[in-house]
Image (cartoon, rainbow, N blue to C red):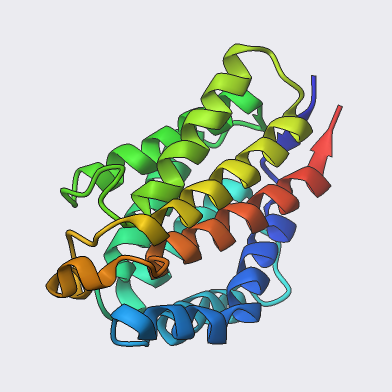
Amino acid sequence: MSVVKNEKGRGILLAMVKGIQDNKQYLGDVDGLIGDGDHGMNMNKGFTMYAEQLGDGETSFSDGLFDLGTVLLNKIGGSMGPIYGTILMEMSDAEGDEDEITLAKFGEMLQAGLDGLYGIVDARPGDKTLVDTLYPACECIKKAAAEGKDFAAALDEMKAAAEAGKESTKDLVAKYGRASRLGERSRGVLDAGATSCCIILQAMADGMKAALED
C-alpha cells in the first residue's frame, strides 16, 4: 500500500508555494471581476513568506501545513488569512505526527480542514466559495479510501474533483463576501477563493504523488 512519509513535507509544501506564485496574476484577475482584486497579491505574500521562513530547512508535512497556516492566519489581509489558516492548521492537527500518511489518513485531514472551515464560516456547497472546491475534493478522497483505491489514482481524481468544483462556481450566485453585493451579476464568473483552493489542492496532490512510497 502506497503512503506518503510525513517527513517528506518540504517538496509538497514548496509545490503549493509555487502553485500560488505562478498564479498570482491570474488570481488577481479573477478576483478583480467581482471582488477587490487583491486575492492573488495577498496569497502570494503569505506563501512566499512561508517559503522564505522555511529557507533550506526540512519540514514534515504536518509541521509545514501548521507553519504555513500560521503565516496565512497572521500575515495576510482580508478574510482569506483566517480561512486558509484554519483549514491548514486543522489538517495538520488531524495528521497527528504519524510517520506515514495513508489515503484514509489524508481523507481525515481534508475532512478536519473542512470541519474547521465550517466552524468559522456559514458557507456550504453551492454558495460560490472555496467550499465548492474543498468539499468535493474531500469527498473524493474519502470515497477512494473506502473503496481501497490506489493512492496516486485517488490524487488524480481529487485534482479533477477540485477542478470541477472550481468551475461550478461560475454558474452560482455569490452569497458571501464582497461579491454577494452584486447578486445575479456575480453569476458567470469564477469565485477567487474556489480558484486558489483548486490551485493549492492540485499542487498538494502533485507534491504528494512525487513523495509516494510503497
Tally of numbered tags: 0
Question: Quadrant location of the C terminus?
Answer: top right
Residue 83: give x, y in percent of width and height.
30, 60
Up/down of 120 relative to 49, above or below:
above
Residue 127: give x, y in percent of width and height.
25, 51
Residue 11 can be seen in this image: yes
Left or right of 63: which side holds 133?
A: left
Left or right of 113: which side holds 64?
A: right
Up/down of 101 relative to 210, above or below:
above
Q: Nearer the viewer, residue 126 or 24?
A: 126
Question: Quadrant location of the N terminus?
Answer: top right
Q: Nearer the viewer, residue 193 or 10?
A: 193
Residue at 72% x, 46% y is 208
Residue furthest to the right in view is: 214
Residue 20: give x, y in percent of width and height.
58, 73
Residue 6 lies in what quarter of the image? top right
Residue furthest to the top in view is: 147
Residue at 72% x, 19% y is 149
Residue 179: give x, y in percent of width and height.
22, 73
Residue at 58% x, 62% y is 199
Up/down of 178 relative to 199, above or below:
below
Residue 64 can be seen in this image: no
Residue 188 lies in what quarter of the image? bottom left
Up/down of 12 relative to 152, above or below:
below
Residue at 19% x, 52% y is 121
Q: Nearer the viewer, residue 28 or 168?
A: 168
